[in-house]
Image: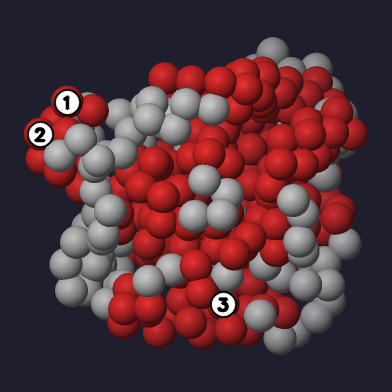
Amino acid sequence: MFGLAYGDALGAPTEFIDMKQIHRRYGFDGPRVPEGNPALVTDDTQMGIAVAEGLLNALENPPFTPDLITPIWRRKFIDWLNSPDNNRAPGNTCLQACRNLEAGLPWVKATQAGSKGCGANMRVTPLGLVPGFTDETRAAASQLQAALTHGHPTGLAASELTAFAVWWLREGMDPADLPGALRARCHEQRTTYHGDWLEDLWQQPGMESPEMFISRGWDECLAVLDRLDAALARLDRDADPCEATGAGWVAEEALATGLLAFLLFPDDAVSAIWRGAASSGDSDSIACLAGAFAGAHLGMDAWPAEWAGRIEYADALARIGGAWD
């Protein structure tokens, strides 16, 4: 949870500037330390906290089902929408979907069906920290939290992969094995549609079946994993990662570029978020994911101790992370 926020804060000032501007502002090395006291995060961390707090509320009243968690997440997302802290340039997809939720629309009508923006990826990371879930529950819940705002199948598949990457790293997977495990997951789940959780979301123009709908998302994730493999074969730690796996504005590219930043420095958490922040794309989101992966793999000792005292929402991050340590 802290890695998520550290990456978010480090990448926020570089989100809308290119590499030349980054080098002019920070020198060739780019940003290395989150700015400010407190170091401010963006909507990525805010909504990650909302998803996590919803999980904690739901897990107090088992069993964990879609009927239990859906109204809780709806309420958390609406609370975020109306929060005075919601002033960090959030994406239009999240804003419009949350307005629709607040208006009382069923979530399958409230969601933005054509959007696979990366907004759902960063906030799913807490689902990779919860012990005791079956793979099916972790997968279905990861896709549901995405689907509440981003209804495109690639947004669902990428969110599931993000959550599983965090879970596998937390459980001790060697980072070098991660791309292969994610690829295998894509193939295994390619036609799995979690109807009890996703209802009739699949009924979109051009879609003849739930399997046809969800396979589109898995296929796009497989394609970007090909680009990730090619980038890791080159292992160029000095290059802008967006040139290899995409700028990160859409879900599958955010996953792949966040993974690339992490896998270039699997044992150096600060360098992982630096590589995400020193990029030409959606830098806060890329660094946010890289930080979550690094934190799941390496733990709190991987970060400078003084950062924990000045990151925004430190109390919430500590409470959430501590609940699942």
Which residue appears at 52% of the width and 46% of the height?
265
Disc 3/disc 2 C-alpha distance (Å): 36 Å
Which residue appears at 42% of the width and 20% of the height?
243
CB under 8 Å between discs 1 and 2: yes
Residue ID for mark 2 = 24
Q: Quadrant of the C terminus?
A: bottom right
Residue 223 visible = yes
Label 3: how many Cα within 10 Å (few below 14, some 14–19, many 20+): some
CB under 8 Å between discs 3 and 2: no
Location of residue 22 in the rendering, given as x and y in whole percent from the top left corner: 18, 35
Indicate the amino acid at tag 1.
Answer: Lys
User: Which one is closest to the eye, mark 3 or mark 2?
Assistant: 2
Q: Secondary structure at mark 1?
A: helix
Indicate the amino acid at tag 2.
Answer: Arg
Disc on res. 321: 3
Disc 1/disc 2 C-alpha distance (Å): 6 Å
CB under 8 Å between discs 3 and 1: no
Label 2: how many Cα within 10 Å (few below 14, some 14–19, many 20+): few
Disc on res. 198: none
Which residue appears at 21% of the width and 74% of the height?
38
Residue ID for mark 1 = 20
Location of residue 170 in the rendering, given as x and y in whole percent from the top left corner: 70, 63
Location of residue 157 in the rendering, given as x and y in whole percent from the top left corner: 69, 37
